[in-house]
Every structure is written in structure tokens, then in C-alpha cells.
Image: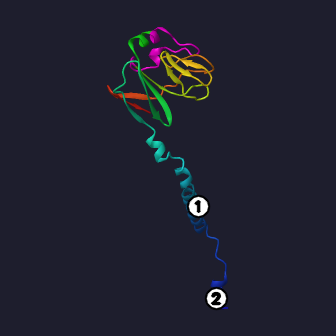
Amino acid sequence: MTDDNKSLEEPLVDDPERRDFLNTVTGVVAGAGVVAASWPFISSMNPSSDVLSKATTEASLTGINPGESKTVEWQGKPVFILRRTDDQIKNMTASQGGKDPEADSDRIQKPDWLIVVGLCTHLGCVPSRSSDGWFCPCHGSKYDNSGRVLHGPAPSNLKLPPYKFVSEDKIVIG
């Protein structure tokens, strides 16, 4: 054998620098593969466009006279907007509610407007409006004009959605 043939047949010499380089390249390629494979899964956790469109709801308060209410939809749930009369405000300020006592001032931003999620806190039914609050016909829960539960199986007051007044006649819920 000649020296040229001998060098082709010999195994490669163990080179630590080459091994470290190959380990680093393999690790980088493997890491990039994991990121590329997991990206669709991570991206699927973002809210879809139809959910984002329901994240906030604008509601006009025009045309709601004292003592009247309006129902709007926010995130697929009914939201009751009640324009309270002076007598209703006075009565609600004087009482603390029944089963889940809470001050009226903690439930409102402006005294003449009450905004609550219109789902009974017992089983999620939609209560009906009555002159002195709301009544859930499914199991008999009764709520006052501040959305506080007075009696029945409902364990807590009607929930308060996050909202803000953007003008005198418009609110944004969410």
C-alpha cells in the first residue's frame, strides 16, 4: 500500500474540536425543530377573531328612560342596563341586600345606571324584569334593583361586568 491509499482507509482521528462543533450544530438544529413543531400548537392558544370581536361591546344609553332597562350582548351573555329612578336609587342606597350583602355604591359607577350580567348565579338562567328588580322563574331567585340577591337558591348577587362610560350616553363593556 502506498501512503496515499493508507490515509484513505484509516479511520478519522478523534478530534475534540470537531466533535464539539458537531454537538453544537446538532443542538441548534434540534432546538429550531422543536420551536418549528410547537409553533402551531402555541399559536392555537391565541383567541380567535370572533372571540376578540366580542371582547368589548359598545352600548348606547340614549332612549332609556328612568325606570326602563335595556339588554345588550357581551361575550355571548346578556347584560342588563337599568336606568334607575330617584325612588329606586333612594331605596337601594338605604338597603344592603339580602343573602349576599353589598353596598349599592360598590355596585355602580353612576347612581342612575346599573349594569349587571343578566345570568342568575344559581344555574345561569336569564331572570325576568319586575318592578322591584329581577325574578328568575326557574327556581325562584329574586334580585333587587341593585342586582343583589334577596331570596331563593342563588348564592350571590348578579355579576358586575367591567365597563366604563366613554360619554354621557355611551358605555363600553369589557
The Cα atoms of the two marked residues, 1 and 2, are separated by: 37 Å
Give residue 5's quadrant in the image.
Answer: bottom right
Element on which disc 1 rests? helix
User: Can you tell which of label 1 and label 2 is closer to the viewer?
Assistant: 1
Q: Residue, x 60% and y 63% (percent of image)?
A: 23
Say which of 109 and 36 sits in front. 109
* Residue 121, x across and y down, in percent: 58, 25
User: Above or below — where is 22 with respect to 136?
Assistant: below
In the picture shown, does residue 111 fall above or below 118? Answer: above
Principal secondary structure, stretch drawn in magenta: loop
**Amino acid type of the residue tagged 2 in the rendering:** Asn
What span is colored magenta in the figure? Answer: 91-112
- Residue in view at x 62 percent, y 23 percent: 139
Type of the residue with mark 1: Ala
Looking at the image, residue 6 lies above or below residue 171: below
Q: Nearer the viewer, residue 50 or 17?
A: 50
Residue 135 placement: quadrant: top right
Q: Assess disc 1: are there few (<14), some (14-19) or many (≥20) residues with their C-alpha within 10 Å of its C-alpha.
A: few
Residue matched to label 1: 30
The residue under the point 61% across, 28% down is: 123
Task: Tell whether position 136 is magenta.
Answer: no
Q: Nearer the viewer, residue 6 or 70?
A: 70
Secondary structure under tag 2 reads helix
Q: Is residue 69 left or right of residue 128?
A: left
Q: Residues within 10 Å of mark 2 (few under 14, many from 20)?
A: few
Kindly identify which residue carries mark 2: 5
Q: Residue 2's x, y, as percent?
A: 64, 91
Q: Measured along the vertical axis of the image, is residue 20 above or below residue 66?
A: below
